[in-house]
Amino acid sequence: MKFNNVARRVLSPRPSEFISTQTENFLRRLKPRPFVVDYIEGVYKTNVLPNVNDDTVTISVLTDTHAKAVVSASYYGINGMRHIIEANQVSNDVGIDLNVHLGDLMDGSDKPEISRGLLKFAVENYQASKPPFFIVEGNHDENDKYDEHRFFKSASFHRDDYDSLVTKYDFEQSEILRLNPVSRVGWFDKGDVRIIFIDTSDIPYILSNGSKKYDFKKVRGVREQQLEDLTTVLQRTVDKHVVVMGHANIVSPSGRSALNFNGDLVQQLLVAFNNKETGQLKNELTGDFGVNIRYDFSATGISKVTTYICGHMHYEKNYKVSEINHIILNCSALMGKKHGLTTDYNKKWDRRYNEISELSGYFINIDPNKLRLQIFGYGAATRYVSFEI
């Protein structure tokens, strides 16, 4: 019943949100595969559950599902959406604290009405599951890949298509907080742990002759208003263990910005928070990505940001910059060994359709008492890694 109510809420009569009925009907035939559900539940019960208690936070995480409305046994396809259905089924069954998708829900290469259908269906599936959820925007989620492939380039998604189909429903949940109705920063609290979500695709939607000034797929960045909101949230974070999540990595192992705009400023802000500093965050840019804000983190108690978790790169990696762990998780999307765009990391897994290697997902357990963050991977993912927080 809840599923049907959700469907009525998401739909809008606006032409920009037109969704293919054929796509909807096709998606509704997707069902979780029993062998996948059994496997993921086994990983949870054997490896994760012994670490779960009233004080811990346990999160189910997928990233980069890159769903397309085609059936593919070797690369991106509708299997990305099936991964969401299966992970959410397990989250329902075992009772985790939070469901997270770190962006690139879809590949963004389908016709706009199909892509909207994929986004709508994914959100409905998250809404129909019991735990609260947060879906981060990825650089493919504005459908710019489709725009690139057209002979006449024009924006296939309108300004608010993604927000009205996805972001709106992140913040309709009482468990997910934000400063105001337009803030791009969200957070989730449980006990002494705070999870903060940022948007690394914080790119202005500006049209010139029907084409976008910025290609969302190619440009990643964070603007001044989001940095100001993040500053405010951090200033109000007292005596918390803080983990930040976003779609793309913000800095490289050397500490240089990994975003086109201001990834290094996000890192600087987190370091200043950890050091309880008062100061100014500024860059030399003007226009869309210029930044000049002040911060005061002197009254945040023992709070500390220990970890930044993201996807985007389609491989796994972790490194430490200024005492903050940066963790990159592998893509859920199937990347077959022989496909030209498959990363070396995924080629080593030799991922195959309808086998366990087709999947890639994670459970993250944060224990504020043991000062430990544990990541339990399944499918084409590292089985276990642990970090101090």
Image: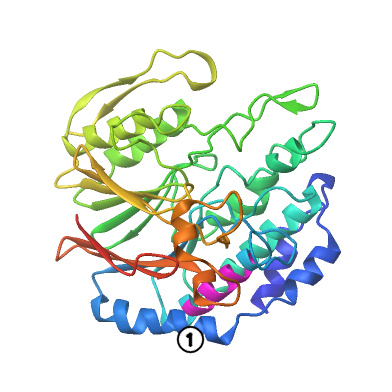
**Mark 1 burial class by Cα count in 10 Å: few <14, some 14-19, many 20+:** few
320 in relation to 240, above or below: above
Q: Locate residue 8, reporting x and y percent.
A: 75, 65
What is the count of numbered marks?
1
- Span of residues in magenta: 81-90
The rendered magenta stretch, by its main secondary structure, is classed as helix
From where the camera sits, is residue 5 visible? yes
Give the residue at x 67% y 53%.
165
From where the camera sits, is residue 174 visible? no
The structure's colour scheme is rainbow
Give the residue at x 25% y 81%.
50
Looking at the image, the residue that sits furthest to the front is 338
Kindly state the secondary structure of the residue where label 1 is placed: helix
Is residue 86 rendered magenta in the image? Answer: yes
Q: Locate residue 228, reporting x and y percent.
A: 39, 30
Quadrant the N terminus occupies: bottom right
In front of the other: 179 or 382: 382
Is residue 245 rendered magenta in the image? Answer: no
Give the residue at x 28% y 49%.
307
Quadrant the C terminus occupies: bottom left
Give the residue at x 77% y 39%.
149
In front of the other: 42 or 135: 42
Q: Locate residue 93, reporting x and y percent.
A: 47, 83
In front of the other: 381 or 275: 381
- Under mark 1, the amino acid is Asp
Left or right: residue 34 compared with residue 97: right
366 in relation to 265, above or below: below
The residue at which mark 1 appears reads as 38
Q: Locate residue 170, reporting x and y percent.
A: 54, 55
